[in-house]
Image (spheres, rainbow, N blue to C red):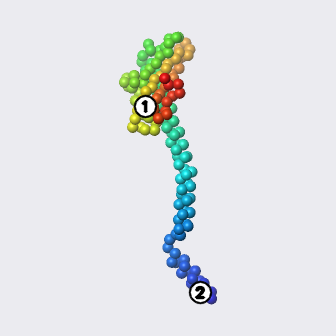
Amino acid sequence: MRNYFKENINQSSLTRFGFTLVELLAVITIIGLLFLIAIPAVNTIINSTAQSVFKANEKSLSQAAENYIRVYPSLLPTNINDTRIELSKLVQTGYLENPRQPKDTTKFCEAGYVIVKKTGKNTYEYLPFLDCGNGFITEGYQ
Protein backbone atom coordinates (compact mmCIF):
# COMPACT_ATOMS: atom_id res chain seq x y z
CA MET A 1 0.00 0.00 0.00
CA ARG A 2 2.86 2.35 0.74
CA ASN A 3 4.35 1.93 -2.73
CA TYR A 4 1.04 2.79 -4.39
CA PHE A 5 0.91 6.25 -2.74
CA LYS A 6 4.57 6.87 -3.47
CA GLU A 7 4.11 6.08 -7.15
CA ASN A 8 1.06 8.34 -7.49
CA ILE A 9 2.81 11.26 -5.83
CA ASN A 10 5.86 10.90 -8.05
CA GLN A 11 3.78 10.53 -11.22
CA SER A 12 1.60 13.56 -10.50
CA SER A 13 4.61 15.78 -9.81
CA LEU A 14 6.34 14.62 -13.00
CA THR A 15 3.38 15.25 -15.31
CA ARG A 16 2.80 18.83 -14.08
CA PHE A 17 4.58 21.14 -16.57
CA GLY A 18 2.97 24.60 -16.20
CA PHE A 19 1.17 26.94 -13.89
CA THR A 20 -2.51 26.84 -13.11
CA LEU A 21 -4.80 29.66 -14.17
CA VAL A 22 -5.17 30.79 -10.56
CA GLU A 23 -1.40 31.02 -10.12
CA LEU A 24 -1.03 33.06 -13.32
CA LEU A 25 -3.83 35.42 -12.30
CA ALA A 26 -2.24 35.89 -8.87
CA VAL A 27 1.12 36.80 -10.43
CA ILE A 28 -0.51 39.21 -12.90
CA THR A 29 -2.45 40.86 -10.06
CA ILE A 30 0.70 41.31 -7.97
CA ILE A 31 2.57 42.83 -10.92
CA GLY A 32 -0.37 45.17 -11.56
CA LEU A 33 -0.35 46.31 -7.95
CA LEU A 34 3.39 46.97 -8.12
CA PHE A 35 2.85 49.16 -11.19
CA LEU A 36 0.07 51.06 -9.43
CA ILE A 37 2.47 51.83 -6.61
CA ALA A 38 5.49 52.60 -8.81
CA ILE A 39 3.96 54.86 -11.49
CA PRO A 40 3.03 57.79 -9.17
CA ALA A 41 6.47 57.60 -7.54
CA VAL A 42 8.21 57.72 -10.93
CA ASN A 43 5.96 60.61 -12.00
CA THR A 44 6.90 62.52 -8.84
CA ILE A 45 10.59 61.98 -9.55
CA ILE A 46 10.19 63.21 -13.14
CA ASN A 47 8.34 66.35 -12.01
CA SER A 48 10.89 67.18 -9.31
CA THR A 49 13.71 66.71 -11.81
CA ALA A 50 12.00 69.06 -14.26
CA GLN A 51 11.58 71.62 -11.47
CA SER A 52 15.29 71.31 -10.64
CA VAL A 53 16.18 71.90 -14.30
CA PHE A 54 13.99 75.01 -14.31
CA LYS A 55 15.69 76.37 -11.17
CA ALA A 56 19.10 75.67 -12.74
CA ASN A 57 18.01 77.61 -15.85
CA GLU A 58 17.03 80.56 -13.64
CA LYS A 59 20.40 80.45 -11.87
CA SER A 60 22.25 80.32 -15.22
CA LEU A 61 20.25 83.31 -16.42
CA SER A 62 21.19 85.27 -13.30
CA GLN A 63 24.90 84.36 -13.58
CA ALA A 64 24.94 85.32 -17.27
CA ALA A 65 23.48 88.72 -16.36
CA GLU A 66 26.19 89.20 -13.71
CA ASN A 67 28.90 88.43 -16.28
CA TYR A 68 27.25 90.75 -18.81
CA ILE A 69 27.17 93.61 -16.26
CA ARG A 70 30.88 93.09 -15.48
CA VAL A 71 31.68 93.81 -19.13
CA TYR A 72 29.14 96.65 -19.40
CA PRO A 73 29.26 98.35 -15.96
CA SER A 74 27.50 101.43 -17.34
CA LEU A 75 24.31 99.34 -17.25
CA LEU A 76 24.41 99.08 -13.45
CA PRO A 77 21.33 100.66 -11.91
CA THR A 78 21.42 104.01 -10.18
CA ASN A 79 19.68 104.72 -6.87
CA ILE A 80 16.29 105.08 -8.54
CA ASN A 81 16.21 102.86 -11.61
CA ASP A 82 16.46 99.10 -12.00
CA THR A 83 18.12 97.55 -15.02
CA ARG A 84 16.36 94.92 -17.08
CA ILE A 85 18.51 92.56 -19.16
CA GLU A 86 16.60 90.42 -21.66
CA LEU A 87 17.30 86.74 -22.21
CA SER A 88 17.56 87.35 -25.95
CA LYS A 89 20.35 89.91 -25.38
CA LEU A 90 22.34 87.42 -23.27
CA VAL A 91 21.89 84.71 -25.91
CA GLN A 92 22.83 87.04 -28.82
CA THR A 93 26.00 88.25 -27.08
CA GLY A 94 27.07 84.70 -26.19
CA TYR A 95 26.78 84.94 -22.42
CA LEU A 96 24.16 82.21 -22.29
CA GLU A 97 22.90 79.37 -24.43
CA ASN A 98 19.18 79.54 -24.94
CA PRO A 99 17.76 77.43 -22.08
CA ARG A 100 15.65 74.43 -23.03
CA GLN A 101 12.25 73.58 -21.63
CA PRO A 102 12.48 71.26 -18.61
CA LYS A 103 10.04 68.61 -19.90
CA ASP A 104 10.61 68.89 -23.66
CA THR A 105 14.29 69.45 -24.36
CA THR A 106 13.65 69.82 -28.09
CA LYS A 107 12.08 73.25 -27.41
CA PHE A 108 13.58 76.39 -25.94
CA CYS A 109 12.25 78.60 -23.16
CA GLU A 110 9.98 81.26 -24.60
CA ALA A 111 11.24 84.40 -22.88
CA GLY A 112 13.03 85.74 -19.86
CA TYR A 113 14.87 88.62 -18.30
CA VAL A 114 16.89 89.60 -15.23
CA ILE A 115 16.13 92.63 -13.08
CA VAL A 116 19.25 94.14 -11.51
CA LYS A 117 18.43 96.11 -8.33
CA LYS A 118 20.79 98.22 -6.29
CA THR A 119 20.70 97.01 -2.67
CA GLY A 120 23.61 98.95 -1.17
CA LYS A 121 26.50 101.24 -2.04
CA ASN A 122 28.23 98.71 -4.31
CA THR A 123 25.91 95.72 -4.00
CA TYR A 124 23.30 94.53 -6.46
CA GLU A 125 20.63 91.88 -6.53
CA TYR A 126 19.94 89.84 -9.67
CA LEU A 127 16.35 88.62 -9.99
CA PRO A 128 15.81 86.15 -12.86
CA PHE A 129 12.42 85.72 -14.49
CA LEU A 130 11.96 82.89 -16.96
CA ASP A 131 9.03 81.56 -19.01
CA CYS A 132 9.61 78.04 -20.29
CA GLY A 133 5.98 77.12 -20.99
CA ASN A 134 4.12 74.06 -19.67
CA GLY A 135 3.63 75.67 -16.27
CA PHE A 136 7.31 76.49 -15.80
CA ILE A 137 7.28 80.23 -15.23
CA THR A 138 8.95 82.30 -12.52
CA GLU A 139 6.49 83.72 -10.03
CA GLY A 140 6.02 87.43 -10.69
CA TYR A 141 6.96 87.17 -14.40
CA GLN A 142 5.59 90.14 -16.36
Indicate the secondary structure of the residue bearing disc 2: helix
Numbered mark located on residue 4 in the image: 2
Task: Indicate the amino acid at tag 2.
Answer: Tyr
Q: Residue reaching furthest top?
A: 79
| Residue at 59 percent of width and 83 percent of height | 6
Q: Are marks 1 and 2 in contact (CB under 8 Å)?
A: no
Q: Residue reaching furthest left?
A: 92
Q: How far across and down, in percent of the image, does residue 78 sit?
A: 50, 11
| Residue at 53 percent of width and 15 percent of height | 118
Vertical relation: 93 (above or below) 50: above
Task: Indicate the amino acid at tag 1.
Answer: Cys
Assign the N terminus to one quadrant of the image.
Answer: bottom right
Comparing 35 with 117, the one in front is 35
Q: Relative to residue 117, is residue 72 drawn left or right?
A: left
Q: How far across and down, in percent of the image, does residue 8 sit?
A: 57, 82
| Residue at 49 percent of width and 23 percent of height | 142
- Where residue 72 sits, quadrant-wise, is top left
Numbered mark located on residue 109 in the image: 1
Vertical relation: 134 (above or below) 5: above
Numbered mark located on residue 16 in the image: none
* Residue 63 visible in rendering: no
Vertical relation: 137 (above or below) 34: above
Q: Residues within 10 Å of mark 1 (few under 14, many from 20)?
A: many
Mark 1 and mark 2: Cα distance apart in space: 79 Å
Q: How far across and down, in percent of the image, does residue 102 sit?
A: 46, 36
Vertical relation: 139 (above or below) 40: above
- Where residue 120 sits, quadrant-wise, is top right
* Residue 20 visible in rendering: yes
Indicate the secondary structure of the residue bearing disc 1: loop
Q: Residue reaching furthest right?
A: 1
Q: How far across and down, in percent of the image, does residue 128 sit?
A: 49, 25
Q: Earlier in the sequence, mark 1 or mark 2?
A: 2
